[in-house]
């Protein structure tokens, strides 16, 4: 499988010089980083593509090809696959649509047979293919529309191309680091389970993310997930859980989706974390990507500079069946000595509207030492006048090195707050928008480790 | 009450020339728009504030004052209120903290008596006060930290200052238009119900938004809300619904919060829309601020250019107990003639990854005419290559004028998608981030009108 992600010599069948065409965008993707190998254009009618020689036939390319990408109309695909087979290419990504998803079963069968005949592993057809931080990028959406993520430890398997890419785009912008993104389309030859199994063993991948509508082999899927979810979180969105949607799924990728309850129950047993919508998935990613400290339990200490956020945090913690920590007298007394008399030093701890970096430093440090506290959840509202971005970031960087407990933060607001969130997340501390989101993520986070 | 929002002659007691001080920020707020009246600095020790003469005593100011703002230490407040009373000032905002919220009942009683004695209406103490698009701005958070919203029809009443201002800041950045924001703090003299009652009659206010922890007079609150919610949506977040939070509330604003179920049940009966978290509130604001067409029913037609989003939309519609519309044969046949053969023209309608503006125009126009459709929900994923921002915005502008049904849109992604969302919302069409959020908002929207 690894050629799908790390291939060094790639042929683009259907590489085109016409701007905006799928074969043009994909070819261009391989001209720059992260790809470091050689790319070859295959096009029977062109002399050159973007200044590179175009090969009329695959066999004209000198040397061995690790991976071929097919981006030509469906009716020419079978022949192209045959040529790949003859050239002993074992890894193939077929972008082209027009197979079982539009009811063309005949072409589907032909393709399946051809792949079997030459023992080719194939992603697609009817997909976006692969984005890998190790080089391969077959996403035919130009970078100004679809931002590529920075390298990281999340791998994302998506049955839906457009939806998957919208999510990838948003994730990239929010600063999530990805190892691999795979849009596998019709799953004719490689399905969601094959990919999860591979990612389970993949050292670059620490968190597996899945958008799936239909599952080809339910039993194997659950078996594989059960094994992998013991060491890596698998976060899944199941599309097509409603009755109406099951019907729509059928026409969308030609696979059948089933009933909500059955899926969610089975997912849970297999250790899969279900996200009920995309936003939820992002919040889970945020915590699992960043925190690798196992929490001792689920007793949360809340710190805030806005009383209301203390209340909302408490509500959310109870709602998600976590616990409010009860810090020791020793801790609270030592903190009281350092704080103004009207600060509320219990749980939640209200550092008040005139809180500065020092109060956060003191309280996080104190609760880090308190055995009654498992996790620290700190709201930092930057609308209040004494929160200095530079000093709070410097303090969090320092704290991140020292603390032995999961620490999550929350901030809300416009440009200034968003900048602060980005910078906090760069220190490796997750920063949520609202207490509700933080508590929901902590719920799954503590469950994963328990 | 209207002097709290439209006062023309305002005295700032505690106006200061020291940058960063509360009395400095507030005084500065009145030096520029939206305030168009006269502002007077009261400060016994300064000669001038920001180049304006400082009055040693309130009575030194020539002419009548409509509104006084007090931003001085708690121990000097009673005397200042007395001076206001003697000068026949009837509207007062007390920013200062240090009353019942820190257990200082004695000072609290003194203040209460003084206000009664002179029949003064007072917002606060322990609050941020008021932001009004008609002029008054006592928020002591500088504009670079707390963005002020554009003028609009939302009015927001918040018990919590810091939390309220974080929400205001985020709302401003997302382009929501506000008429008034009121942080009422300890609610000693004017409480949440008084404010809602006023906003219910206020012509500038079309949507009322509330963040409340404790409610002073439950029966009156519900009576007032029941009446107003018939004509204006009231969206409320109730902080302090958990047992632990009830305790924290007590120390935060000195008011008592109660049990979740009791509140939610009573809210519902009074026609209040409960938002369970801040994000939910934003989604409700999005739809109630923008759409003023009454939906005929709750049959939704889904349009998308990403099959997965069609599935997720269908799931969300079923989850929130809305209905999938069943468009007439006439509509789908006429649309099929205009679309490529593989486009899926039913519900959801999948315009495919190569969808352009024309396909959206055709399908929205067709479903607008179809009697079987009450509401249109269109996903526009801009990662696909043929979505042109300019043309889609021009088309939506045109459609907004023509259509007779609520239309909501969805888009997901990074910079490009966010730009698109902003521009769509400028046309007056709500644009959500995910199908789940759109369906949740439509649920409350259709309930409000039914």
Image: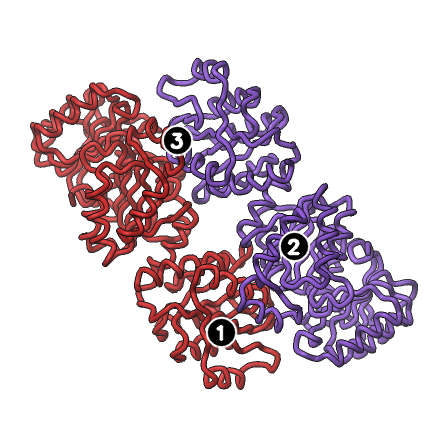
Chain colours: A red, B purple
Instruction: Give whichever of discs 3 and 2 has the lower sequence position.
Output: 2
Q: Nearer the viewer, residue A3 or A245?
A: A245
Q: Is residue A63 left or right of residue A257?
A: left
Q: Nearer the viewer, residue B306 or A436?
A: A436
Give above or below for B409 relative to A80.
below
> If the image is split into quadrants, where does the C terminus of chain A sit?
bottom left
Return the x and y of residue A53 as percentages of the image width and height: 19, 29
Q: Which of the chains bears the disc numbered 2?
A: B
Quadrant in the rendering for residue B441: top right
Give above or below for A311 relative to A276.
below
> Crowdedness of circle 3 by 10 Å Cα count: few (<14), some, many (20+)?
some
Q: Which of the chains bears the disc numbered 3?
A: B
> If the image is split into quadrants, where does the N terminus of chain A sit?
top left
Residue found at x 61% / y 52%? B265
Return the x and y of residue B383 as percentages of the image width and height: 40, 36
Q: Is residue B137 left or right of residue A444?
A: right
Instruction: Kindly state the secondary structure of the residue where label 2 is placed.
Output: strand
Q: Which residue, given by chain and number where applicable, does mark 2 sit on?
A: B210
Mark 3 on the same chain as mark 1 = no
Q: Which of the chains bears the disc numbered 1?
A: A
Q: Which residue, given by chain and number where applicable, does mark 1 sit on?
A: A360
> Crowdedness of circle 1 by 10 Å Cα count: few (<14), some, many (20+)?
many
Q: Which residue, given by chain and number where applicable, does mark 3 sit on?
A: B385
CA gap between label 2 and label 1 equals 29 Å
């Amino acid at each position: 499988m690894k050629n799908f992600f790390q291939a060094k010599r790639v042929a683009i069948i259907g590489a085109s010089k016409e701007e905006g065409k799928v074969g043009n965008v994909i070819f261009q993707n391989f001209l720059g980083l992260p790809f470091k190998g050689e790319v070859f254009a295959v096009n029977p009618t062109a002399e050159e593509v973007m200044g590179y020689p175009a090969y009329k036939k695959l066999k004209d390319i000198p040397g061995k090809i690790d991976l071929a990408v097919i981006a030509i109309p469906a009716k020419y695909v079978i022949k192209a696959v045959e040529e790949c087979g003859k050239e002993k290419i074992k890894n193939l990504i077929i972008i082209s649509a027009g197979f079982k998803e539009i009811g063309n079963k005949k072409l589907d069968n032909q393709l399946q047979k051809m792949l079997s005949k030459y023992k080719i592993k194939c992603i697609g057809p009817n997909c976006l293919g692969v984005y890998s931080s190790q080089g391969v990028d077959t996403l035919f959406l130009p970078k100004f529309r679809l931002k590529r993520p920075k390298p990281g430890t999340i791998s994302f398997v998506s049955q839906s191309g457009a939806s998957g890419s919208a999510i990838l785009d948003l994730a990239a912008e929010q600063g999530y680091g990805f190892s691999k993104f795979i849009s596998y389309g019709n799953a004719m030859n490689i399905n969601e389970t094959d990919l999860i199994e591979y990612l389970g063993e993949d050292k670059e991948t620490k968190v597996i993310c899945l958008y799936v509508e239909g599952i080809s082999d339910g039993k194997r899927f659950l078996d594989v997930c059960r094994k992998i979810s013991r060491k890596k979180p698998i976060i899944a969105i199941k599309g097509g859980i409603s009755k109406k949607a099951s019907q729509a799924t059928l026409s969308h990728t030609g696979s059948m989706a089933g009933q909500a309850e059955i899926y969610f129950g089975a997912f849970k047993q297999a250790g899969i974390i279900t996200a009920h919508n995309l936003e939820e998935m992002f919040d889970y990613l945020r915590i699992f990507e960043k925190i690798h400290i196992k929490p001792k339990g689920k007793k949360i200490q809340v710190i805030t500079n806005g009383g209301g956020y203390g209340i909302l945090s408490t509500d959310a913690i109870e709602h998600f069946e976590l616990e409010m920590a009860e810090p020791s007298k020793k801790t609270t007394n030592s903190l009281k000595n350092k704080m103004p008399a009207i600060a509320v030093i219990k749980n939640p701890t209200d550092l008040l509207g005139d809180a500065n970096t020092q109060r956060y430093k003191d309280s996080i440090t104190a609760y880090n030492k308190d055995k009654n506290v498992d996790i620290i959840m700190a709201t930092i509202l930057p609308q209040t006048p004494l929160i200095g971005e530079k000093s709070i970031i410097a303090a969090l960087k320092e704290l991140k090195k020292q603390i032995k407990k999961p620490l999550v933060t929350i901030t809300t607001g416009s440009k200034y707050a968003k900048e602060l969130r980005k910078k906090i997340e760069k220190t490796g501390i997750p920063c949520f928008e609202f207490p509700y989101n933080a508590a929901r993520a902590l719920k799954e986070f503590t469950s994963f480790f328990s």
